[in-house]
Amino acid sequence: MRLILLGPPGAGKGTQAKILVDTYGIPQLSTGDILRSAIAAKTPLGLEAKAIVDRGDLVSDAIVNGIVSERLDAEDCKPGFILDGFPRTIAQAEALDQMLVDKGVKLDAVIEIKADADELVRRVIQRAKESGGARADDNEEVLRKRLGVYQEQTAPLVAYYAEGGLLKTVNGMEPVDQVTAAIKAAIAH
Ligand code: ADP
């Protein structure tokens, strides 16, 4: 099973990805998590990415494409993977298409998780409180920036994958288990 979870910050991509990891026995590839680990470990990548991530901008396509390409070659991705937070631009989607051609594999589905802007803000502010400020980008100002970046750069992927016949849309406003059920049903069809 090879899946992409698409949706704005706070839509529930990470939450659903973790559940689907158990269901399908495939890894979650979160570019956000990979970048945050690099930042915490102060690796060269982390030092380069920190200011960009903290202000809510996108790290360059070249950097994230490299991260994903390398990660997809790992043994645990052989049976499949769940991409969470990648691709985020049309250029990243095109790069991913090429990586998959090179590896001789195909995506099964792109799941778009939709939610209202007010609910997204509420969830991310809640996440910030619960995590004790672990994420420098989970504050209202940077969040609004990330939502704007999503609308501008990532939302066009909905049409991109709809054209390819891969897009399935679920309602991210429902309770977590209902969203999971909707995703599983969408995959099965
Ligand atoms: P969320 O979906 O909650 O906004 P993520 O954890 O997916 O957060 O990403 C956090 C930040 O990491 C982004 O705002 C961006 O700076 C960086 N990032 C993650 N994935 C990508 C990507 N595919 N391309 C560019 N930047 C990325």
Image (spheres, grey):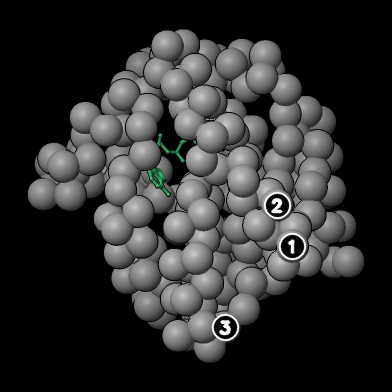
What's the mark number on residue 159?
2
Q: Which mark is residue 142?
A: none
Say whether mark 1 is within 8 Å of ligand 1.
no
Q: Nearer the viewer, residue 167 or 178?
A: 167
Helix, strand or loop at label 2? It is helix
Q: Which residue is mark 1?
A: 163
Q: Position of residue 141 (x, y in %)?
A: 42, 11
Ligand 1 rendered quadrant: top left
Mark 1 touches mark 2? (CB < 8 Å): yes
Residue 188 vertical position relative to residue 110 in the rendered view, above or below: below
- Which numbered dot is residue 105? 3
Q: Nearer the viewer, residue 172 or 65?
A: 65
Instruction: Name the quadrant containing residue 59.
Output: top left
Q: Is residue 22 visible?
A: no
Q: Residues within 10 Å of mark 1 (few under 14, many from 20)?
A: few
Q: Amino acid at mark 2?
A: Ala
Helix, strand or loop for disc 1: helix
Q: Residues within 10 Å of mark 3 (few under 14, many from 20)?
A: few
* Residue at 83% over, 49% down: 181
What distance separates the C-alpha of mark 1 from that of mark 2?
A: 6 Å
Using the image, determine if residue 71 lies above or below residue 121: below
Instruction: Assign a secondary structure to mark 3.
Output: loop
> For the point 70% across and 52% down, which residue is it?
159
Q: Position of residue 30 (x, y in %)?
A: 45, 51
Q: Nearer the viewer, mark 3 or mark 1?
A: 1
* First in sequence: mark 3 vs mark 1: 3
Dot 1 amino acid type: Glu
The amino acid type of the residue labelled 3 equals Val
Between residue 76 and residue 83, name the one nearer to us: 83
Expressed as whole percent of the image width and height from the top left, the position of residue 62 reads 29, 58
Percent x, y for residue 89? 49, 49
160 up-or-down from 147: above or below: below
